[in-house]
């Protein structure tokens, strides 16, 4: 999994510091949006030829890790 997370980059001078795929201007949120819209992995890779299958997996792993945070009860 850490290999996949290495595909996610954050650069304060690119895309407003939002997480991107391998230093490209394709944000993790862009990948998640097209997946949520119902496009298959094959369709996404066809529409965005700079992406690789592991980039899609990396976006999902990244989102999962960001959402899996401890909840503190007051």
Image: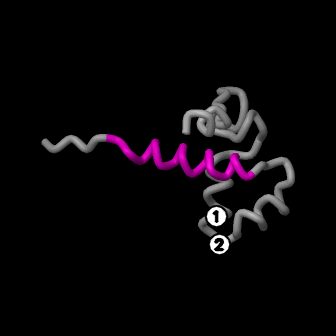
The x, y position of residue 28, in whole percent, is: 64, 47
Numbered disc 1: secondary structure: helix
Q: Is 43 placed left or right of 70 in the picture?
A: right
Look at the picture and state if 2 lies above or below 68.
Answer: above
Examine the structure image and report whether residue 57 is included in the region drawn in magenta. Answer: yes
Look at the picture and state if 55 lies above or below 17.
Answer: below
**Residue ranking furthest to the top:** 12
Q: Indicate the quadrant containing the N terminus: top left, top right, bottom left or bottom right.
A: top right
The x, y position of residue 69, in whole percent, is: 35, 41
Look at the picture and state if 54 lies above or below 11.
Answer: below
CA separation, marks 1 and 2? 5 Å
**Residue ranking furthest to the left:** 74
**Is residue 64 among the parts visible in the rendering?**
yes
Residue found at x 77% / y 49%? 52
The x, y position of residue 23, in whole percent, is: 75, 33
Q: Give the residue at mark 2.
A: 38
Look at the picture and state if 62 lies above or below 32.
Answer: above
Residue found at x 13% / y 42%? 74
Around disc 2, counting alpha carbons within 10 Å, would you say few (fewer than 14), some (14 to 19), or many (20 or more)? few
Q: Give the residue at mark 1.
A: 35
The image quadrant that residue 71 belongs to is top left
Span colored in magenta? 53-69
- Tag 1 near tag 2, CB within 8 Å: no
Tally of numbered tags: 2
Numbered disc 2: secondary structure: loop
The x, y position of residue 37, in whole percent, is: 64, 70
């Amino acid at each position: 999994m850490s290999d996949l997370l290495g595909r996610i980059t954050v650069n304060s001078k690119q895309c407003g510091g939002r997480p991107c795929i391998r230093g490209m201007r394709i944000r993790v949120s862009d990948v998640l949006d097209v997946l949520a819209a119902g496009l298959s992995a094959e369709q996404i890779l066809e529409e965005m030829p700079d992406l690789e299958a592991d980039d899609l997996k990396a976006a999902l792993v990244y989102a999962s890790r960001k959402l899996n945070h401890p909840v503190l009860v007051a």
